[in-house]
Amino acid sequence: CLLPSGLSVRAHLSVLSTPVHSCPLLSSPALPASTAHRHSRGYRPGRERLIHQATGSKMLPALLLRNARGNPAPLARLFSSSPSPSSSPVPCVNHNDQFFRTNDGVQLRFTDSGGDGPPLVLLHGWTANGRWFDKNTPFLSENGLRVVTLDYRGMGDSEKPGHGTRVSRISKDVKELLDYLALQKATLIGTSMGFTVISLYYEMFQKHRLAGVGFVDQTAAQFMKPGWEYGSPGNCAREMVIDLQAELKYNPSNFARAVATGGFGVTPPTEEEYKWFSREFMKCDLEFCGRLMEDHANLDMRDLIPHMKLPVLNFLGGSTKCHNFDGMAYIGEHAPNALNVTYDSFGHWLYWEDADRFNKHVLEFVNYVHKYDGDDELGPPMEQLGYLQDVV
């Protein structure tokens, strides 16, 4: 799920046995934004057309797609800038840790900024935890949102019960948290496996307590199969999951570093970030996570996506190492009311790499869907959100 495309777990770990500065994965020259876009996504004539939109003094490529409503809506924007160097790449956030117990007796850690603003629930990916959003929660809460994070069972500082290794159980945990906090018109944003968590939430509970949803860098189906070549090249078959489970058991520290490398786009993590992500990764019950990946990777959401009757904001890492771009774009192309937004130089963890831009996009989206009081069952039209104009 978090491994660079085209490399097996073992192959990737062998690459990481070399010093970071000499790693071929990290030292290969970046293609120009438009070239990299064409090279990595395989344009198909008739489906997409590339235009250029002036933004200030720059000419940045923008992508026009036709959404499932049939409207020629602007569904993607390429951000070709590289992340600015930070004097403190790992923020220091004081967490107000809280806990609640699920209906099957598992104690889960969550944070809640409180207040009466529009609620936003940030849902992390596989082998991560709520601290992955430390670059997002301060800004979003300071700008009026009630921001909630959750550590899934078996991860972070939540209990490690050894059972519930199905994404549907995590979706049920999310539903119980929303009920526990009595949130209304909440927006759920899920990164990586968080897409699957939210999708199954919608399948089981529909729009219960929801105003909109967002996804970050996840394909609609990870396993490749006849008629679907847009899975996750690094984890696209049952045999790869078995290999992944073995690496979790026998090489967890190397695997943690591989996960961090796979999370970033053009610019690799700093050593401080490697250490931070590795420490948080090692909080997981890795045997549990291996079994959970077996369930997650096998799920195919393509039949559900056209029935998601609510606003969908779909973030794509234009330089992701984890998923096929067309497989990720499929979500925004087939959900009835969706917008794809592409961060061209950034990867699987674009919300960490380009946090300032992500935060402002999320803030606009949450406020936009929360204030809607119309009667369209799909919610406010996403093509009017205006993401072709950079809000930063």
Image: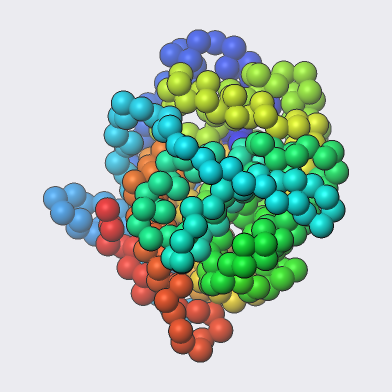
* Residue depicted at 54% across the width and 72% down the height: 185
Any part of residue 154 in sight: yes
- As rendered, which of 19 and 367 lies closer to the eye? 367
Instruction: Residue at 45%, 72% (x, y): give it.
Output: 369
Res 63 seen here: no
Q: Is residue 374 above or below residue 392?
A: below
254 left or right of 135?
Answer: right
Q: Residue furthest bottom?
A: 375
**Whole-percent x and y of residue 194?**
62, 51
**Residue 170 picture location, percent across and down:** 73, 52
**Number of callouts:** 0
Location of the N terminus (image quadrant):
top right
Seen from the viewer's position, the closer of residues 370 and 290 is: 370
Is 140 or 101 nearer to us in this picture? 101
Image point (54%, 52%), residue name: 112
Quarter assignment of residue 179: bottom right
Could you tell me which residue is drawn at 14 percent across and 50 percent down? 57
Depth order, front residue of 294/150: 150
- Name the side, left or right, on which 388 lies relative to 202: left
Question: Measured along the vertical axis of the image, is residue 378 above or below residue 29?
Answer: below
Please tell me in which quadrant of the rendered image residue 159 appears: top right
Q: In this rendering, is residue 49 above or below 26? A: below
Counting from the top left corner in percent of width and height, residue 168 is at: 77, 56
Q: Position of residue 380 (x, y in %)?
A: 45, 78
